[in-house]
Image (spheres, rainbow, N blue to C red):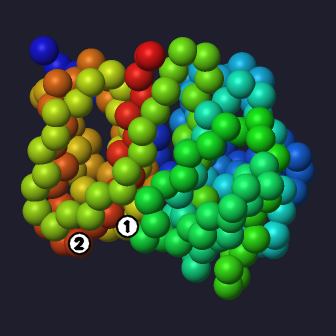
């Protein structure tokens, strides 16, 4: 059986202001397609921060954030102990309705965000490869190419991704990534709980 694969090319991503107007974001993919900020079930976006700023509040949403580029961010969530995030850090997961503010460590950053609501949950991880990587998958998976070029194959469907291109794969049992040169990507799994 061939998996369902949809490609979101970098040139087609939607650019918009943050919900709170304090920054800009690039919507990479969302479900259902075309859903507004109050209707999406899940949303993958890349937020640009040029100065310290509070994050937009999203009631009922769980968010995971990773530093996509830039030196990093000191993230304060609901008055808790600050979390230092750098490109090499593990992604940070938190409730998006909690008050959060980001302080730049040394210049602008871009933050990769996956947000889910309702009975959906998610996981995010960054992978580096030069060669082949095969994974077992369940549910929906997004593959976002960060740097380099890669081939994505899932149960017979395949596509080539350049930086900021994203593949949405549904109903796949296996996922294979291939790159002939050093490449990095984010893998985001979305599933019902």
Q: Which residue lies furthest to the bottom in this view?
A: 106
In the picture, measured across the screen, residue 113 lies left or right of residue 159, that is: right
Q: Residue 57 carries which label?
A: none
Q: Helix, strand, or loop for circle 1?
A: strand
Q: Mark 1 points at which residue?
A: 147
Kindly indicate whether the residue at mark 2 contacts the one at mark 1 (C-beta within 8 angstroms): yes
Q: Gap between marks 1 and 2, in whole Å?
A: 8 Å
Q: Mark 2 points at which residue?
A: 182
The correct choice, above or below, for 93 with respect to 107 in the image is: above
In this view of the protein, which residue sits in the foreground, 176 or 99? 99
Residue located at (62% from left, 23% from top): 117
Question: Mark 1: few, some, or many residues within 10 Å (few <14, many ≥20)?
Answer: some
Quadrant location, the N terminus: top left
Residue located at (43% from left, 71% from top): 88
Residue located at (80% from left, 55% from top): 79
Q: Helix, strand, or loop for circle 2?
A: strand
The spot of residue 30 in percent (x, y) is: 57, 30
Residue located at (88% from left, 46% from top): 20
In the picture, measured across the screen, residue 12 lies left or right of residue 157, that is: right
Decide if residue 8 is in sight here. Answer: yes
The correct choice, above or below, for 35 with respect to 11 in the image is: above
**Residue 128 occupies which quadrant of the picture?**
bottom left
The spot of residue 86 in percent (x, y) is: 53, 72
């Amino acid at each position: 059986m061939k998996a369902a694969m949809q490609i979101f090319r970098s040139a087609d991503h939607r650019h918009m202001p943050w919900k709170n107007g304090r920054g800009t974001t690039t919507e990479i993919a969302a479900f259902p397609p075309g859903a507004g900020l109050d209707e999406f079930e899940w949303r993958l976006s890349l937020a640009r921060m040029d100065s310290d700023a509070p994050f937009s509040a999203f009631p009922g949403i769980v968010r995971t954030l990773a530093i996509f580029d830039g030196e990093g961010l000191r993230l304060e969530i609901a008055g808790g102990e600050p979390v230092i995030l750098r490109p090499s850090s593990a992604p940070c997961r938190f409730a998006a309705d909690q008050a959060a503010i980001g302080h730049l460590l040394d210049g602008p950053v871009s933050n990769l965000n996956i947000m889910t609501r309702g009975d959906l949950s998610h996981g995010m991880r960054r992978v580096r490869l030069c060669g082949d990587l095969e994974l077992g998958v369940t549910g929906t998976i997004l593959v976002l190419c960060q740097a380099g070029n890669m081939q994505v194959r899932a149960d017979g469907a395949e596509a080539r991704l350049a930086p900021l291109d994203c593949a949405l794969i549904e109903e796949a049992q296996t996922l294979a990534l291939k790159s002939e040169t050093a490449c990095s990507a984010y893998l985001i799994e979305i599933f019902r709980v």
